[in-house]
Image (tube, rainbow, N blue to C red):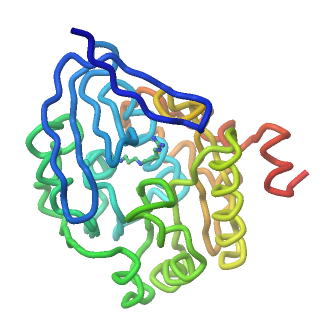
Amino acid sequence: MELWFTEEHTKDVRFSIRVERQLVSVKSRYQEIAVFDTKEFGKVLALDGYVMLTEKDEFIYHEMITHVPMAVNPDVRNVLIIGAGDGGTVRELTRYKTIEHIDMVEIDEEVVNVCKEYLTKTSCELNDERLNIYYEDGLKYVRRKNNEYDLIIVDSTDPFGPGEGLFTKEFYGNCYQALNEKGILINQHESPYYEDDAASMVRAHKNIESVFEYSFVYQFHMPTYPSGHWLFGFASKKYDPVKDLQQDAWNKLGITTGYYNTELHKGAFALPNYVKELLNEQ
Ligand code: AG3
């Protein structure tokens, strides 16, 4: 019997992966969590039917969400991550010996439990001694923080369901407060391609832009996400991610990567014209 997982990318477009075996499917307080094994992409994590990661392409996402800000400020010591229960972002951050402290705020403890059991490629560093995990709503957590972090990474789901609040102006304003004067905010910024995703990404950009002195968007290729064309946001109080790139310092660290490099870093901020138009930056 053939078994297929299908995600609806739009009302008229579907993306399917042939499944060898479903490994787990649980309903938490917040969402349905499923992991299945596939030939093409290895293990796949889906939340409420949306692909969050696959073992084959997660390195692209997790390298781009981590090494871009770290190459702009290699002196980051204190980091806050919102979401990220699969551990991929933590895994990349723990490669920096200079990082002293990581707070991770994940709303759904069940995601961490499932990933620890089934997705060890991403969850492998969730026991790092520099890491503290808080199981609560990131939106509420940042309200209490002031001038504390060098870097905040918002590694969220799409802007509906449990992740919805993480795309609001109120949330970005609280992140601004929680960051120190050198602080950088990186956020999961959706895709510019299909209409609904593009509308979410424009909204997110407007909200961030109204809060931060510097706000940019950068792109990467994500084969299993809708359209394959995905964005992260880079916002800060003082850094231009291309002009302030610490190319030599980062390359001296000798961190081996499968996707990220400092040449690609510069190119990732060069956006296609239709994306610039959406962002009103033509
Ligand atoms: N964050 C989810 C990105 C959005 C995927 N959207 C979709 N498939 N419709 C991934 C978290 C990885 N740490």
Task: Residue at 27%, 63% (x, y): give it.
Answer: 30
Between 67 and 170, the one nearer to me in the picture: 170
Who is closer to the viewer here, 224 or 65?
224
Say if residue 147 shows up in the picture. Answer: yes
In this rendering, is residue 157 above or below 228?
A: below
Considering every residue shown, the one lying at the far right of the view is 282
- Residue occupying the point 50% across, 35% down: 8
- Total label count? 0
> In terms of image quadrants, where is residue 58?
top left
Q: Indicate the position of residue 47 as horizontal and vertical percent values.
A: 32, 47
Where is 201 relative to 275, above or below? below
**With 224 as the anchor, is 136 left or right in this view?**
left
Q: Tell me if I can see residue 102 in this picture.
A: no
Where ligand 1 lies, by image quadrant?
top left
User: Could you tell me which residue is drawn at 54 percent across and 80 percent down?
Assistant: 176
Left or right? Give the position of 204 relative to 226: right
Please tell me in which quadrant of the rendered image residue 254 appears: top left
Vertical order, 94 against 136 (above or below): above
Q: In x, y percent, where is residue 93?
A: 32, 52
Q: Position of residue 215 (x, y in %)?
A: 69, 64
- The one nearer the camera, 30 or 216, is 30
Quadrant for the N terminus in the image: top left
Q: Is residue 230 above or below residue 200?
A: above
Percent position (x, y) of residue 66? 43, 50
Q: Residue at x 76, y 41 (%)?
A: 271
